[in-house]
Image (cartoon, coloured by chain):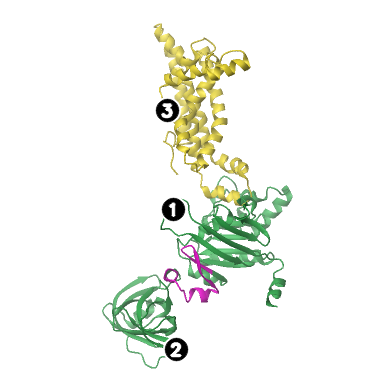
Amino acid sequence: MANQVTAVSCTSGSRFDVRLRYKRPGAASDSFELSVDFQLDPGFTILFGPSGAGKSTLLDCVAGLLIPSVARIALDIDLLQDSDAQIFLPPQRRRLAYLFQAPALFPHLTVEENVAFGLHNLHEEARDNAVQNLLEAFRVDRLAHRKASQISGGEAQRVALARALAPSPRAVLLDEPLKGLDAELRSSIVDDLRAWNRARQIPILYVTHQRDEVDALGERVLALDRGLIVAEGAPHTVLDAPRKKRLAYAAGFENHLSALVQDVRESDGVMRARLAGTETDIEVPLGYATVGTRIRVAIRAGDILLATRKPEGLSARNILAGVIDSLEINGPTVICRVNAGAMFLVHITRGAQRALELAAGHSVWLVIKTHSCHLVDE
Amino acid sequence: MEALWLSIRLAGCVAVSLLLLGMPLAYWLSQTKWRGKFLVESVVALPLVLPPTVLGFYLLLAMGADGPLGKLWTAWFGHTLAFTFTGLVLASILYSLPFAVQPLVLAFESIDQRLLDAAAVLGAGRWRVFRQILLPLSVPGIITAVVLSFAHTLGEFGVVLMVGGNIPGITRTVSIDIYDRVQSLDYAAANHMAIALLLISFAVLSTIFAVNRRVWSPWPTK
């Protein structure tokens, strides 16, 4: 019944099935193979992963710019590649939009000519109309007659998006398209893209390695690491509880601690674990572990509180004594390194640092909630 | 003057033929991932290091009445290829091949692969990508290729002497003419010709350097 409802609500959208394996020819023997199997529904899906995880390679394979050895890539019932049936559609016949990290505008053509490039089958009048509409939709109509080589980075990326969407693609691939642009510009471009897709409902695969972009888009996330999809689901389930160490780094977990499980309290849903090389115990959420198991705990630097006196009456279960090792100012944030047996990174504001008069050598207390401690695999 | 005009005609024919021939060859060289590509590159670059007399000698054998090319030509046109203007054009095409192909390959390879990818994803087939993206972005390289093969052909001596002989109005080019005049101690006439050639060469090189500085580089590696 639930399936039927989904089918009805997405009548105009299409489904993108991707299953492929690819290994770069001549790559070192220890390099990984890309091996994925996933479906994209209409609307945004985010492909998240650390750099070098294989994200761009995956998009190149889907677009047909690289040829995976084994693959079945299908849009609804149209096959783009099926290695079993010896079907391979070249990129020019796939009708996909693909936006690279760089805009890659044709430098010898004007903005208008760039956008019209994918529309050469249309009659002149229809083409001019389509180009005009797209330039307006992405707010670059005033640049129509400028040479592509003479516009700014943010403008170029908008033009590249308009150009990619011009030939009515059946799916959109975006490879960190807004890298290097500020957050405001990024979200306005994404809003324009959402508006464009509202009537079309085609699948959009958006690649990023920036945590804040994932939060801003707030859609389904596929997490890719070393060529494999290691997690998928809503952003907070995938990224707030990363199961892989490398993914945790990428998602902004600055603290990685090794610990030995001391005690498992299933009824409370927690475990007590001793930080390696210390006498300090911390309480962490219950995981697949037994007493004596070595676990890895990831904690965001921004999830740790600092106190100058031992706090009392708090619900937080972990209160550790430590000494400030060093302070480093990084924009609005102060990065504190605190030695509490193990070294912890703690982010505080500059105002907090001034108010507490924190300096290297001072004794402090670290306050960490049990559920700020995330168990990750190696 | 007859010799100078002949040389310019020859160089013009060769430059145009080399552009038509060199473009697909250079495109293929810039795109292919074939392992044996270096063999083709070596053959194309051979005239750069081979003494012109060696090249001329084998061309003469091939084009002569008993040579494979000569026999074929005689069967079709009723006369041999050696010692004719056409023979000279064919020989010069081979001799100047690297001067056309190298700048073209360099131009094609220096184009950002992502531009070609973008064009393909936008629905353009190979021919359209070549015509609308690759070609317009390679204009400096194309000018360099034409001008260099023209200039190089204009000054050739050894190959012309071997294949063309020294027939006034047919195969006596300007450099051979200069050699003849010096042999007969007519230094004034030789000087006239030499200055004309010097000026043309200078004009040619300044044209190239004005449009494109990367001229005689070794085979580019991507």
- Judging from the image, mark 2 belongs to the subunit labelled A
Q: Which residue is mark 3?
A: B48
Q: Which chain has been coloured green in this picture? A: A
- Judging from the image, mark 3 belongs to the subunit labelled B
- Amino acid carrying label 3: it is Leu
Residue A126 shows in the view: yes
Residue A341 location in percent, x, y? 29, 80
* Sequence-first tag of 1 and 2: 1
- Amino acid carrying label 1: it is Ala
Give the magenta-colored segment's residue range: A222-248
Q: Nearer the viewer, mark 3 or mark 1?
A: 1
Q: Please, what secondary structure does the residue beneath circle 3 have?
A: helix
Residue A238 highlighted magenta (yes or no): yes
Residue B107 location in percent, x, y? 50, 39
Q: Which chain has been coloured yellow in this picture? A: B
Residue A185 shows in the view: no
State how far apart marks 2 and 3 are (Cα).
81 Å
